[in-house]
């Protein structure tokens, strides 16, 4: 993997460039919204990638709770962080699309709200990881990840009913999807998945390296001469 | 149209800054490792 | 099975007796909730018609903040003199301890609710237009939703730095669905426009899911080392 990394990085960059070209020049312009709608070729694939990573985090956490394998925990951290980055992208590009199309930056629509809650949950997960001390971190984080996975359906459910009780402010687009649009979406998603996977791999290596450093630290502390003599 | 460019730029700024933060963290760890290693 | 409930009731009785003698948690929660009520009244004009629509949110935010005060103290007592470590090495299972703590907090929050509800009614001129008896299941299920996760997250934040801040950081995002359900249920009952049944069922689902999850994972978290 280490040797293949530059090649994979170049391939991913090429794929991203191709997806960009398709999204900007090949995909037909939307009749209602004009060119601005092309934001969705970044927005929606980022959202899907985010779900892939959060799901990876959940699976890795379960594996950690059963097997207590430190590698599973490293996968869980890396997936949560990369997922949170993609979630941030979704939350930033969303309002940039909503502003010209809906005329407002933000509305407490159920999809926006639940994505924000998802962001908050995973942010609290990473804060817990940062603040907890010693060797309990992986166990606590894994338990919290399971709680997050249980919470999300309830979040979607509650907010969906909460928000559909009131009239929706504005609903953009709708209707059927053009097959050419779907094709560009898929290309873009593939590109972002590759990119996300590379970032994830970097983060995973970083986590493994961090553990090596910590181990060396504790080894050093053990070998050190006692000072009180 | 400006919003389109803004969104694309924002996406890459977010990804770029995350990669930068990874690089900084990696460099700090490497320095730490270097400080630890030479002592036998 | 009988030893399970014996441990639960023994721990619960101990906690209640301690609380009865010191009244630390109850007093601080009461005062805190009172402050929230007064402060909120300054941020908007609590006239009767308006307040009916926002009262649900206001009441539950006050209870949520007050509950955090009690939840933060839950395990602090056990940390002194390493009681928790002693419990950990004893052959007693972990879940009775969790249940006792959760029941204890539930009782504290319920007492606060019983004392604060008349005050809210007076201060904000509330008169429910819907079926008022439904507020009782909402209060019970809502408090349990806050308390069961709160007790669990408080146990989690024992192992962290600055644990008083950690608890709300963990508890608030995870409680959002429960909070939406409680607030909506209370509001629909107060305004009498809709049926609150859906929200009560949602709260019940939340309670069942997270009670089971807490009982399954508590031992893991307590023994995390």
Image (cartoon, coloured by chain):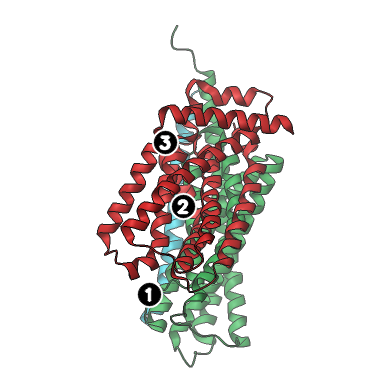
Chain the render paints red: C
Which of marks 3 and 2 precedes in the sequence? 3
| Alpha carbon separation for disc pair 1 and 3 | 43 Å
In the rendered image of the structure, the colour used to display chain A is green
| Alpha carbon separation for disc pair 2 and 1 | 25 Å
Badge 1 element? loop
**Nearer-the-camera pick, C40 or A152:** C40
In the rendered image of the structure, the colour used to display chain B is cyan
Instruction: Report which residue position mark 1 lands on.
Output: A105
> Tag 1: Cα neighbours inside 10 Å, few (<14), some, or many (≥20)?
few
- Looking at the image, the residue that sits furthest to the right is C1
Q: Nearer the viewer, mark 1 or mark 3?
A: 3
> The numbered mark 3 sits on a residue in which chain?
C
Please give the label number shown on residue C134: none
Q: Is any atom of residue C81 visible in this view?
A: yes
Badge 2 element? helix
Please give the label number shown on residue C25: 3
| Alpha carbon separation for disc pair 2 and 3 | 20 Å
Q: Position of residue A20 (x, y in %)?
A: 51, 77
**Nearer-the-camera pick, C168 or A198:** C168
Instruction: Report which residue position mark 2 lands on.
Output: C172
Left of A185 or right of it: where is C116? Answer: left
Question: Is circle 2 on the same chain as circle 3?
Answer: yes
- Residue at the spot x=55%, y=76% of the render? A19
- Residue at the spot x=52%, y=22% of the render? C82
Quarter where residue C88 is shown? top right
Q: Position of residue A62 (x, y in %)?
A: 67, 48
Q: Nearer the viewer, mark 2 or mark 3?
A: 3
Q: Nearer the viewer, mark 2 or mark 1?
A: 2
Left of C118 or right of it: where is C40? Answer: left
Badge 3 element? helix
- Quadrant, the C terminus of chain A: top left
């Amino acid at each position: 993997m280490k040797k293949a990394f530059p090649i994979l990085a170049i391939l991913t960059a090429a794929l991203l460039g191709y997806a960009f070209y398709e999204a900007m020049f090949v995909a037909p312009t939307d009749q209602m919204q004009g060119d601005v709608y092309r934001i969705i070729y970044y927005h929606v694939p980022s959202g899907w990638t985010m779900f892939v990573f959060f799901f990876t985090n959940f699976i890795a956490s379960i594996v950690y709770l059963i097997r207590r394998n430190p590698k599973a925990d490293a996968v869980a951290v890396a997936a949560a962080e990369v997922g949170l980055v993609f979630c941030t992208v979704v939350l930033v590009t969303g309002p940039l699309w909503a502003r010209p199309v809906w005329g407002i930056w933000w509305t407490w629509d159920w999809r926006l709200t639940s994505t924000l809650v998802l962001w908050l949950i995973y942010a609290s997960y990473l804060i817990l990881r940062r603040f907890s001390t010693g060797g309990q971190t992986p166990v606590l984080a894994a338990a919290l990840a399971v709680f997050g996975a249980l919470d999300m359906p309830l979040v979607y459910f509650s907010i969906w009913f909460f928000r559909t009780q009131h009239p929706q402010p504005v609903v953009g687009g709708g209707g059927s999807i053009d097959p050419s649009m779907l094709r560009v979406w898929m290309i873009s998603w593939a590109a972002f998945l590759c990119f996300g996977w590379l970032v994830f791999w970097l983060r995973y290596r970083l986590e493994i390296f961090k553990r090596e450093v910590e181990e060396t630290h504790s080894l050093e502390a053990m070998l050190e001469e006692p000072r009180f003599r | 149209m400006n919003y389109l460019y803004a969104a694309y730029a924002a996406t890459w700024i977010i990804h770029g800054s995350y990669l930068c933060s990874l690089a900084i963290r990696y460099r700090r760890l490497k320095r730490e490792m270097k400080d630890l290693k030479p002592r036998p | 099975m009988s030893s399970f409930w014996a441990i639960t009731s023994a721990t619960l009785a101990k906690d209640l007796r301690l609380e009865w003698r010191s009244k630390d948690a109850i007093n601080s929660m009461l005062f805190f909730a009172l402050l929230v009520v007064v402060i909120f009244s300054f941020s908007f004009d609590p006239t009767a018609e308006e307040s009916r629509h926002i009262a649900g949110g206001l009441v539950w935010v006050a209870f949520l903040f007050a509950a955090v005060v009690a939840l933060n103290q839950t395990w602090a007592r056990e940390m002194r003199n390493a009681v928790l470590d002693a419990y950990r090495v004893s052959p007693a299972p972990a879940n009775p301890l969790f249940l006792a703590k959760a029941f204890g907090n539930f009782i504290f929050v319920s007492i606060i609710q019983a004392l604060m509800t008349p005050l809210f009614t007076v201060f904000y001129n509330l008169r429910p237009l819907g079926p008022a008896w439904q507020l009782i299941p909402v209060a019970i299920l809502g408090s349990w939703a806050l308390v069961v996760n709160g007790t669990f997250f408080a146990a989690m934040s024992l192992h962290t730095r600055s644990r008083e801040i950690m608890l709300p950081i963990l508890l608030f995002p995870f409680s959002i669905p429960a909070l939406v359900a409680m607030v909506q249920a209370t509001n629909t009952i107060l305004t009498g426009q809709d049926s609150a049944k859906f929200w009560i069922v949602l709260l019940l689902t939340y309670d069942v899911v997270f009670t089971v999850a807490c009982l399954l994972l508590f031992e893991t978290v307590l023994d995390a080392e």
